[in-house]
Image (cartoon, rainbow, N blue to C red):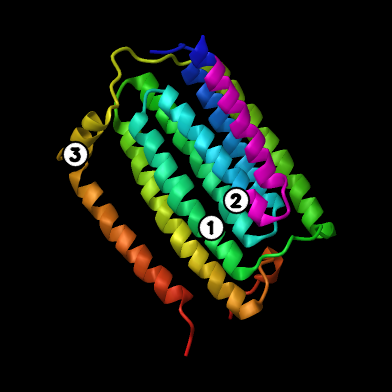
Amino acid sequence: MENPAFVHHALVLSLVLFALGTLGVFLRRNVITVLMCVELMLNGVNLAFIAFSRAAGTLDGQVLVFFVMVVAAAEAAVGLAIVIALHRHRDTLDIDAFNVMKG
Amino acid sequence: MMDAAVFYAFAALAVLSALVVIAQRNPFYSAFALIVTLCSLSVIFALLGSPFIAVLQVIVYAGAIMVLFLFVIMLLNVRREDAGKGGARTMGGIATGLVVLLVLEAGTVLLRLQPGPAPGFDASTRKMAQVLFSPQFLYVFEATSILILAALVGAVALAKKEP
């Protein structure tokens, strides 16, 4: 079906996306943007799973991507609910404002 | 030849929009750039021979999850974040160094690996369904529905107004 270099280059792309996501988690100070950068990292991992599944010729990687997507959806729902609760308590979304465990 | 042009065009688009996601101070524009990244990744999934995951990527990620993000951004009326203070800058510098190290290390491994595609690969929706509902994954698959239910109840409980 395709160019044999695709698998290798997809892995490089997944590395770049994961690195950009990690960088965003450290550099951004808005809680919602940090959550979006986590989604970016998850997508880099998904791409690596798909590329390795293509290289190995089995479907296990594809099934794993399916489960990662389910967990990402659950994580986004719970994470955004926590963001809404935090915004109600502190009236800000700056990550530096949330530095104590006690509400 | 055509395949390669589409692959590299969408790979470049994914990297550029991912850069916008982390460079943008306004989360609203970050969310839109992330939608572009997710859609171009879906094209790359399709080119790697995984049509089922490609469609799922658009429906679940770009559709459901990102709509949730945009909904919360508009609900909370998020403002632009302002420039970081001294402490945040040092933190960012250290993080950048660590990420560069990660890229160098994983990049050298990848350069040595150079994997190619296996012959006779079939990830059609029919095949995916057979694997997902095989005894190997059936119980895990059913467990995800409980996970989704728990997340649903948890999200409602967390976000509801306290009396």
Subunit under mark 3: B
Query: Foreground: B101 or A40?
Result: A40
Q: Secondary structure at mark 2?
A: helix
Is there a contact, CB below 8 Å, between mark 1 and mark 2? yes
Q: Are marks 1 and 2 on the same chain?
A: yes
Corner quadrant of residue A58? top left
* Residue B127 in the image: above or below residue A68: above
User: Is B27 one of the magenta-colored residues?
Assistant: yes
Q: Amino acid at mark 2?
A: Ala
Magenta-colored segment: predominant secondary structure: helix
Q: Which residue is mark 3?
A: B136
Corner quadrant of residue A103? bottom right
The mark that comes first in sequence, 2 or 3, is 2
Is there a contact, CB below 8 Å, between mark 3 and mark 1? no
Subunit under mark 1: B
Find residue B55 and report its horizontal and vertical position in percent: 38, 37
Q: Which residue is mark 1?
A: B69
Subunit under mark 2: B
* Outermost residue toward the top in this view: B1
Instruction: Name the front one of labels 2 and 3.
Output: 2
Query: Disc 3 versus disc 1: distance between alpha carbons?
Result: 34 Å
* Residue A65 in the image: above or below residue B157: above
* Outermost residue toward the bottom in this view: B163
